Image (tube, coloured by chain):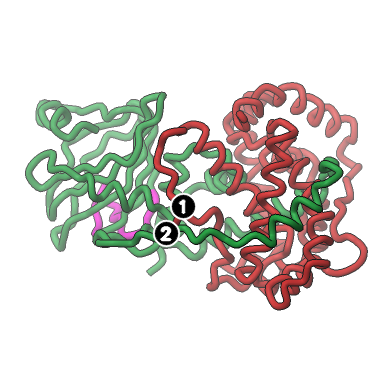
Amino acid sequence: MHVLSNASRGLGVALAADHKATRQCGAARRVTLRAQPAGRDLSASIVAIATTGDRDAFAQLFEHFAPRVKSYLVRLGAGSDVAEELAQDTLLAVWRRAAAFDPSRAAASTWVFTIARNLRIDLARRERRPQGPDDPSRAAFDPAPPDLALSILQDEKRIARAIEVLPPEQSQVVRLAFYFDKPHSEIAAELGLPLGTVKSRLRLAVARLRAALGDAS
Amino acid sequence: MIPQYHPSEERLCDHTTGAQAEGPASVITAHLGACQPCRARVRVLEAVGGALLLDLDPAPMHADALAVALARIERPVDKAPVHRSQSPPLPDWIDDKLPEVRDAWRRRRWAAPGVWVAPVRRERDGARSYLLRVGPSMSVPKHSHRGSEMVCVLKGAYVDGGSTHRVGDFVENDATVVHVPTVTPDGECVCLVYADAALAPRGWIGRLFQPFVGI
């Protein structure tokens, strides 16, 4: 049950592999992201849970998201059992909090990502503070803030495309940040790049993503 | 009113991926509660996280995983007691998002005339988070930092090096900053502070002040 400490162990190897892969790809090659599964829209399934308690919709979401959430957690260094458990908890939260999901404001994947991330953070904190007060009133995740209307962000395909068209060196830094849960300072150390280089790549990447996804601010 | 001082892009990214330690994460969360534009920034990053999540190769779940899940959703939800009492004079987003900060307020103790400190948490590596209240027109004695410091203003305002920091503003100071933050005359100022090392007082007033304040 040491989600975070395990993460650091595998990082060096995995970073090196990703780094190498990016180099081998060269500047020209870009990866295509998988976006939406066939069949019913993921967002519609969450809405169906909220409105009618649709078990089939839940099963479909579970089959799609649980293995990916597990995969995400394993990448971050969780053991297989912990990852399985957190993936279960994530999907249980999807069921229970479905009414808080607003398909006009966020993509299903965004919402599920934030739930998985927050449950993982909560677990890591409980581990570090086993006898600390475990405040049950604490929400494990934020529902979509009601004051945001970034309609493009509900569209999984457009988000995926915005990432695909990033220059490889920017895409690499973004992926490492999300897949290894390392602060930018540690990514710089692992890649053997100056901190300023990682910061500027991250900033450029985020600026491009914002431009593509229509930052409202 | 929208805050004028914001976390860097890299900080928001670390915040979104969950890479940030609890102390800095609280200060950023406090800022996000007050700052709609930064919430929108985080939203974009979360969308990226979601897209990358979908792109991962699935890791097979146990054979009975779906059956387990379908059984779990039928169980009644235990209603967690929501204890919300005696709200401190802090913004309501603190109450909602940062219960540990709200709770810390009850542990505040006067450290010097006009100054109280309420410890929020202390990490094993010596980093700590606390609420700091300084009275109107008062200054924190001249100091620098042995490490880095993050501050979010929760109430009132202070002036530092010609800039005024108001409610919701996020400020990050590193060891190169030597300053004398001064609270504006119109009221007390309460900040959530994360510091990865103790202050380094400059001058005898500060050295006298520090042991009492304990920051």
- Indicate the secondary structure of the residue bearing disc 2: loop
In the visual, does B85 lie left or right of A168?
left
Q: Nearer the viewer, residue B6 or B114?
A: B114
Can you see residue B48?
no
Q: Name the residue located 60 percent from the left edge and 62 percent from the top edge.
A: B76
Q: Which mark is residue B81?
A: 2
The answer to whether residue A217 is magenta is: no
Residue A159 position by quadrant: bottom right
Count of labels shown?
2
Residue A100 position by quadrant: bottom right
What is the chain identity of the residue bearing mark 1?
A
Q: Is residue A60 above or below residue B62?
A: below
Identify which amino acid the numbered label 2 is placed on. Pro
What crowding class fits label 2: few (fewer than 14 Cα within 10 Å), some (14-19), or many (20 or more)? few
Image coordinates for residue A129, horizontal then vertical, percent: 45, 33
In the visual, does B188 lie left or right of B16?
left
Highlighted range, magenta: B156-170
Identify which amino acid the numbered label 1 is placed on. Pro
Residue behind mark 1: A136
Q: Which chain is green?
A: B
Q: Which chain is red?
A: A
Image coordinates for residue A80, horizontal then vertical, percent: 75, 33
Q: Name the residue located 17 percent from the left edge and 56 percent from the top edge.
A: B188
- Outermost residue, bottom direction? A51
Q: Which mark is residue B172?
A: none
- Indicate the secondary structure of the residue bearing disc 1: loop
In the visual, does A195 lie left or right of A168?
left
